[in-house]
Amino acid sequence: MIKQKTIAGEICIKGKGIHTGYETTLCFKPAEENTGYTFVRTDLPGKPQIPALADNVFDTSRGSSLRNGEAVVRTIEHVLAAVVGCDIDNIIIELDHEETPIIDGSSKHFTEALLKTGIREQNAERKVYEIPTRCYLKDEEKDVEMYLIPDEEYRITTMVDYNSSVLGTQNAKLKNVAEFNEHFSAARTFVFLSEVQALLKHNLIQGGDIKNAIVFVDKILSQDELDYLATVFNQPRVSVLEEGILNNVELNYPNEPARHKTLDVLGDLALVGLRFTGHVMANKPGHKTNVEFAKLIRNKIQETYGNTSLPH
């Protein structure tokens, strides 16, 4: 019998949201048994709660965002990946603004905070659901495929292919969630320079800089364009390395983009709201298909096990 877990105390992290640019304080707090993962907007009247469930997702354009009534919380996948990676069942995540801090674009700082406060075992038994049959999802438009096949463990294999000279085919395998903290949590988000320019035109990535994302240069830039990016990112200068990465950024892992996509899958599939086993295989995953797959898995669990007493 495995017991449920929460954290031993409260701990807070501050940082800017990558798209809004607003400074946010995020606080992790212990939660009662069978609470699951719940976000709380402390800056809004009544401090509304937003359960971390796929059915509450309303936007997946540049991250996964949740809504409950008028309350929203944005870019939650890195936080949830850290919570799952630390083997936590129940937690309250309070924010005083709508977007989580991006920090360095990975889950590392959230993971370190959770481990610093400590993990506490609770009395209630953890329910883990075995998926008895294969689940499959395909997005024809984006050429994305996601599978889940029965397995005694929960593991994730991710494959990406951007058909680019600066970032081609990569894969990564999380053999066991226990590997996440050491081998995946420091994998940072990444973006192509062509996307950066489009995002800036739409008034997004207001909190973005070259410290919280790996920028792959997929086009030749003039000096004027480089100078403009230096101004946007508040840097004295920006340059392109031979590898096609903006500025002097070293990768934490040779396949860091594939590992980050694995991190995103882990965080988004936390929105199932239930513990489950199975081997997830994701080909070119994105937040939209991750969330759709989370809904599919939850439905499969409910079809198989019926209306049992479940968290959330």
Image (tube, rainbow, N blue to C red):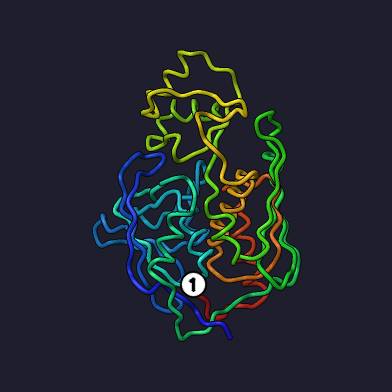
> Does dot 1 land on a helix, a strand or a loop?
loop
Asked whether residue 288 is in view, the answer is no
Asked whether residue 292 is in view, the answer is yes
* Residue named by callout 1: 89
The x, y position of residue 113, in whole percent, is 40, 61
Task: Name the residue: 58% across, 71% down.
Answer: 275
- Location of residue 51 with respect to 162 vertically, above or below: below
Disc 1 crowd, CA 10 A, few/some/many (<14, 14-19, 20+): many
Residue 112 in which image quadrant: bottom left
The x, y position of residue 190, in whole percent, is 54, 39
- Location of residue 122 with respect to 167 vertically, above or below: below
Task: Name the residue: 44% across, 25% down.
Answer: 201
At label 1, the amino acid type is Asp
Q: Name the residue nearer the viewer: 152 or 61.
A: 152
Residue 291 in which image quadrant: bottom right
Q: Would residue 295 appear left or right of 283 to someone viewing this image?
A: left
Task: Name the residue: 43% across, 64% down.
Answer: 51
Task: Name the residue: 71% across, 32% down.
Answer: 163
